[in-house]
Image (tube, helix red, strand yellow):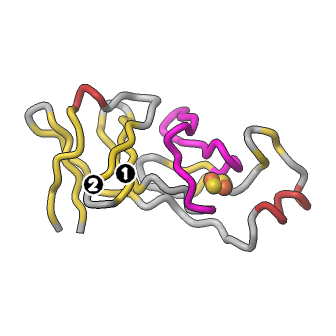
Amino acid sequence: MSQLEAADADDVLEGAVHAVTLSGTKIGLTRVNGTVQAFVNKCPHLGLPLTKGKIVDGVITCPFHGSSFSLCSGAAQDWVTGIMGMNMPGAVRGVITMGKTPRGLAMLEASEVAGKVFVALG
Ligand code: FES
């Protein structure tokens, strides 16, 4: 597994996703309580980017169908709640899930050294 330079540390902020591509992998970087977190920037539901996701208390909510994930563990907190921020009743949600069962966000090991953020890719 190699550690790749991903960003300037100053570009990685609380409450926002800094999107980068490393070796062809789309990665999201953010901070939770000051600590850099890195994840594969594809929602586990349909693989859409989480770059515009809303982050509250270390949890990111997908802007497309409302699934949410811990940015520390990657664990799913909620799974497909609606469309583009509008909550939908259970029957509609069942259709939107497209048969996908809840799964977590793929987290990556990240570190911060001398003003740079590094991500482990293997
Ligand atoms: S793509 Fe994220 S919840 Fe559907």
Marks 2 and 1: which is nearer the front? 2
- Residue 89 vs 122, above or below: the answer is above
Q: Dividing the image into 4 quarters, which one contains the C terminus? A: bottom left
- In what element is the residue under mark 1? strand
Marks 2 and 1 in Cβ contact (< 8 Å): yes
Residue placed farthest to the front in the image?
A: 24
| Residue denoted by label 2 | 22
- Residue 117 vs 81, above or below: the answer is above
Percent coordinates x, y for residue 107 in the rendering: 38, 57
In primary-sequence order, the first of circles 2 and 1 is 2
Q: Residues within 10 Å of mark 1 (few under 14, many from 20)?
A: many
Instruction: Please give the label number shown on residue 27.
Output: 1
State the separation of the CA atoms marked 2 and 1: 7 Å
- In what element is the residue under mark 2? strand
Instruction: Give me the residue at 43% from left, 61% from top.
Output: 106
- Residue 121 vs 26, above or below: the answer is below
Q: Dividing the image into 4 quarters, which one contains the N terminus? A: bottom left
* Three-letter amino acid code at the position of disc 2: Leu
Magenta region includes residue 58? yes
Q: In front here: 13 or 34?
A: 13
Percent coordinates x, y for residue 50 in the rendering: 52, 46
Per the rendered image, the range of residues in magenta is 45-67
Q: In front here: 111 or 85?
A: 85
